[in-house]
Image (tube, rainbow, N blue to C red):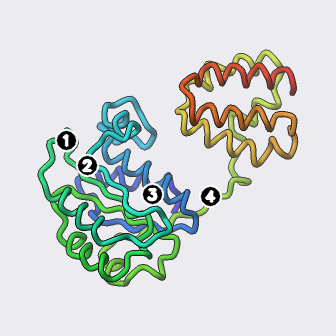
């Protein structure tokens, strides 16, 4: 299933108040899994059930990591330890005073849930506290304990081939004239930051390092600035001025 399609399906279920309480998401790439789990969790908390991040309070709090009813366990490689599972269960069994009624936890490597921690989790998955949603991720679904698998709704995420997707805004920009490049700045600033980073990464890998090597450094700089600085508008201006001079 494509990511977008899966998210739309979950939104439909949330609207109908029929959301699965345990979901197992499978894909061979941990980053794809993490991104998807993040986006799904944020959507669950979003006051407007928005697939794209919007400006509601919960989306903001999700981005600031200040939602106490959202927990991620495991780092995608190490085994998940029993104490962490127990702590999670205790925390989620308490009633919440959060505005949003959902509690969501992500287990980033379900195949590493070994017997002891798996046992403590099983009952929790079977009889979750009200409005608790478990999102289990796995790079290898055949290694997830059958007892866990059987209690979850399995979603296998497709790998969406970057080469098949249409040119994104950044790649289109590279073919434009100087003025159009500079004029794109308002448009770029409106794009959600994480989305812009993703577009730049695709443009970098697919087009820039192949056809516009002289822009490689500026592109990496912009990606870096978007990730780690607050002066993102300035960084976008600098990037556009640079490419308008080079392209
Ligand atoms: Zn929102």
Query: Does label 2 or label 3 sit earlier along the sequence?
Result: 3
How crowded is the residue under tag 3: few (<14 C-alpha within 10 Å), some, or many (20+)?
some
Q: Are marks 2 and 3 in contact (CB under 8 Å)?
A: no
Q: Residues within 10 Å of mark 2 (few under 14, many from 20)?
A: some
Secondary structure found at label 2: loop
Between disc 4 and disc 1, the foreground one is 1
Q: Secondary structure at mark 1?
A: loop
Q: Nearer the viewer, residue 232 or 181?
A: 232
Does any atom of ligand 1 lie closer than 8 Å to the CB of label 2? no
Residue 171's disc is none
Q: How many marks?
A: 4
Say above or below: 78 vs 207.
below
- Spatial CA span between label 2 and label 1: 7 Å
Percent x, y of residue 109: 44, 68
Q: CA distance from mark 4 to mark 2?
A: 31 Å
- Residue 104 in the image: state x and y as whole percent: 29, 54
The residue that label 4 is drawn on is: 160
Residue hosting label 2 = 69
Determine contact: label 2, label 1, CB under 8 Å: yes
Q: Which residue is mark 1?
A: 98
In the rendered image, which quarter contains the C terminus? Answer: top right
Question: Mark 4 near mark 2, Cβ–Cβ under 8 Å?
Answer: no
Position of residue 10 measured from the top left corner of the image (x, y, whole percent): 36, 55
- How far apart are the alpha carbons under marks 3 and 4? 13 Å
Look at the picture and state if 234 lies above or below 24. above
The tag earlier along the polypeptide, 4 or 2, is 2
Read off the residue under disc 3: 6
Of badges 2 and 3, the one in the foreground is: 2
Q: CA distance from mark 3 to mark 1?
A: 26 Å
């Amino acid at each position: 299933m494509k990511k977008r399609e899966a998210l739309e399906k979950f939104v439909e279920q949330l609207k109908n108040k029929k959301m699965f309480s345990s979901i197992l998401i499978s894909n061979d790439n941990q980053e794809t899994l993490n991104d998807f789990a993040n986006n799904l969790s944020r959507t669950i908390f979003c006051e407007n059930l928005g697939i794209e991040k919007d400006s509601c309070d919960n989306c903001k709090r999700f981005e600031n990591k200040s939602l106490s009813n959202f927990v991620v366990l495991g780092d995608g490689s190490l085994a998940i330890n029993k104490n962490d599972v127990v702590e999670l269960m205790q925390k989620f069994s308490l009633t919440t005073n959060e505005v949003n009624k959902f509690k969501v936890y992500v287990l980033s490597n379900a195949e590493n849930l070994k017997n002891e921690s798996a046992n403590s989790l099983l009952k929790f998955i079977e009889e979750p506290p009200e409005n608790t949603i478990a999102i289990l991720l796995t790079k290898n679904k055949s290694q997830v304990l059958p007892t866990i698998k059987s209690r979850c709704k399995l979603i296998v995420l497709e790998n969406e081939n970057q080469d098949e997707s249409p040119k994104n805004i950044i790649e289109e920009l590279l073919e434009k004239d100087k003025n159009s490049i500079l004029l794109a700045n308002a448009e770029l600033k409106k794009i959600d930051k994480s989305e812009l980073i993703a577009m730049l990464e695709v443009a970098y890998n697919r087009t820039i390092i192949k056809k516009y090597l002289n822009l490689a450094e500026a592109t990496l700089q912009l990606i870096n600035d978007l990730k780690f600085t607050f002066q993102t508008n300035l960084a976008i201006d600098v990037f556009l001025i640079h490419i308008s001079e080079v392209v």
